[in-house]
Image (tube, helix red, strand yellow):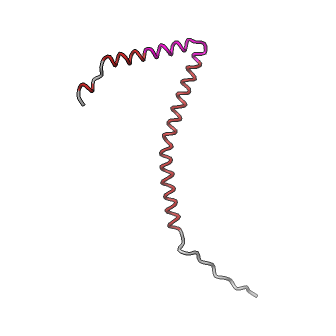
């Protein structure tokens, strides 16, 4: 990695700062509108719910791997427990 690649261009920082400032201004304007505060609160709640859902979905991959591993173990146990051939119990003679 060269030194030129590691440093950022000052104009890039200016653009990002300007965008951040515009975003803050937009949020302030929305908050000033009638019902704007309630809308912002709803957006924040939605963001939190999406974040929570994404954490849960990421956990599903690990669960699927565990289930697949357990299914293989159960299949191996079933194969190991199969009897060679089923044997019949000897027939009893009827008594007097």
Estimate the x, y position of residue 83 in percent, counting from the top left. Answer: 54, 72
Residue lying furthest left = 2
At 43% from the left and 14% from the top, the residue drawn is: 21
Q: Which residues are magenta?
A: 21-37
Q: Residue at x 30, y 17 (%)?
A: 10
Q: Is residue 51 above or below residue 76?
A: above
Residue 35 is inside the magenta segment: yes
Relative side of 80 to 10, left or right: right
Image position of 39 with respect to 67: above or below: above
Query: Residue 34 location in percent, x, y?
Result: 60, 12
Q: Is residue 93 left or right of residue 77?
A: right
- Report if residue 8 lies within the magenta region: no
Which quarter of the rendered picture does the N terminus lie within? top left
On the image, which quarter does residue 30 sit in? top right
Dividing the image into 4 quarters, which one contains the C terminus? bottom right
Q: Position of residue 19 (x, y in %)?
A: 42, 17
Query: Toward the viewer: 31 or 94?
Result: 31
Residue at coordinates 56% horizontally, 21% vertically from top-left? 41
Q: Residue furthest right?
A: 96
Exactly how many numbered labels are in the figure?
Answer: 0
Q: Name above or below for residue 86 compared with residue 51.
A: below
Magenta segment, prevailing SS (helix, strand or loop): helix
Given the current orientation, which residue lies at the most extreme bottom position? 96
Residue 49, quarter of the rendered image: top right
| Residue 35, x across and y down, in percent | 60, 15
């Amino acid at each position: 990695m060269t030194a030129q690649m590691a440093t950022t261009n000052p104009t890039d920082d200016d653009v990002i700062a300007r965008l951040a400032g515009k975003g803050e201004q937009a949020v302030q304007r929305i908050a000033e509108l009638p019902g704007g505060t309630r809308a912002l609160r709803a957006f924040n709640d939605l963001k939190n719910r999406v974040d929570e859902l994404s954490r849960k979905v990421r956990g599903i991959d690990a669960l699927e791997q565990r289930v697949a591993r357990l299914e293989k173990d159960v299949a191996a146990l079933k194969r190991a427990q199969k009897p060679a051939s089923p044997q019949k119990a000897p027939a009893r003679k009827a008594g007097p």
